[in-house]
Image (tube, rainbow, N blue to C red):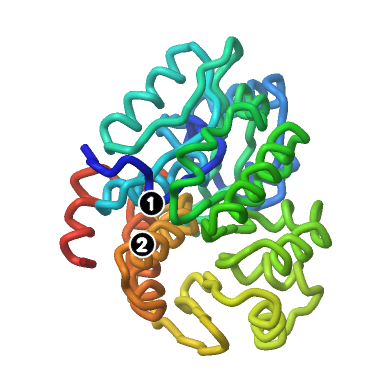
Amino acid sequence: MFLESYPLIFGIGNPLIDIVINADNQDLKILDLNKGTMQLVDEKKQESIINYFTENQQQYFPGGSAPNTILACSGLGVNAHIAGKVGSDKLGKTYLNRIKEYGSDSGLIQGTGTTGSSIILVTPDGERTMNTHLGMCQEYCSDDIDTDKLSGSSFLYFTGYMWDTNSQKLAIKKAIQIAQDNNVKIVFDVADPYAVMRNRQTFLDLIEKNIDIVFANESEIKILFESDNLEYCFEKISDIVNCGGLKLGKDGSLVFYDKQKYKIKPNSVRAIDTTGAGDMYAAGFLASIAKGKDYSVAGKNAVLLAEEVIKIQGAQLELSSITKMAEKLF
């Protein structure tokens, strides 16, 4: 249990239950799904996908991009708050218990609908394709923000997934204003190639005008700057924001701060499931700078944590595993 009155990191996101199923490329083709992306679907579509995989094992894990990051930050010893909305159902209670287990400060509100869920299809190469029904997540609104806790935090963290509904978008805009009024650093992970496609100019304006630290992977940044030249994209992003980390998968990461560039080399790891790799990268980076580490160390820790989660099935490391990682990193 943390003793600080205010969290160091205030996260807002979609608390989802992940339903992980092993699939192959032919399955994705039959289901007409775009590999390696997240798409919003209704409950009927989710049901049809579940029915297609009746003979495949289905594993249930608490997930959601920003919540994954915040829970990991708590496990790494950083006081962190997660805001969002779940249902008053069994899955909602499961999520609340998970937050309590990790020692995160809960800002989750229970609504009357169903808890959001994401069917994650994992192909043999470890790539994941997500089919998400937001459920109560989409009801999160400006009035749900704990203004006092956010005002006293050091970092506000959210992802591009929060642009999928107007209610969530307005909540993030309010949170940004509160953060700026109280000198809280704003951290943004663009999150998904399709999210960038839907909101390219909005994200560019947001990054340039409001963001202190940005995270993106290679696909996302190339879409953002409409170029296949990674070096060009890296220069462009470092021109409009002071700090960030580019997630390059098997090639490690590029980190920049105040025009200084750091190349983070990867380790040789066999990927079982890449779900949560970006979320753990953000957690390793955020927890490191929250603990006063420099940006090159933050980048190294981010890559190490991402490499740890892709060794397992699911998007969250067990608390015992992440506690061991904290001892190793800090």
Q: Is residue 257 above or below residue 280?
A: below
The crowd level at tag 1 (other Cα within 10 Å; few <14, some 14-19, many 20+) is many
Task: Kindly tell me whether residue 268 is visible in this rendering.
Answer: no
Cα separation, mark 1 vs mark 2, equals 7 Å
Dot 2: within a 10 Å radius of its alpha carbon, few (fewer than 14), some, or many (20 or more) residues? some
Please report contact status of discs 1 and 2: CB closer than 8 Å, yes or no.
yes
Query: Is residue 76 something one can see in this rendering?
Result: yes
What SS does tag 1 mark?
loop
Helix, strand or loop status at disc 2: helix
* Residue that sits furthest to the front in the current view: 181
- Can you identify the residue that label 1 sits on? 8
Sequence-earlier tag: 1 or 2? 1
- Residue 167 percent location from the top left of the image: 73, 32
- Specify the quadrant that holds the C terminus: bottom left
In the image, taking residue 28 as reference, residue 261 lies left or right, namely left
122, above or below 208, in the image: above
Residue 261 in the image: x percent, y percent? 51, 88
Q: Tell which of 169 and 86 is nearer to you.
A: 169
Residue that mark 2 sits on? 290
The residue sitting at 66% across, 87% down in the picture is 231
Image quarter of residue 311? bottom left
Residue 222 lies, with reference to residue 140, above or below; the image says below
Residue 102 quadrant: top left
Of 103 and 268, nearer the camera is: 103
Kindly identify the amino acid type of the residue bearing the numbered disc 1: Leu
Residue sitting nearer the eye, 66 or 253: 66
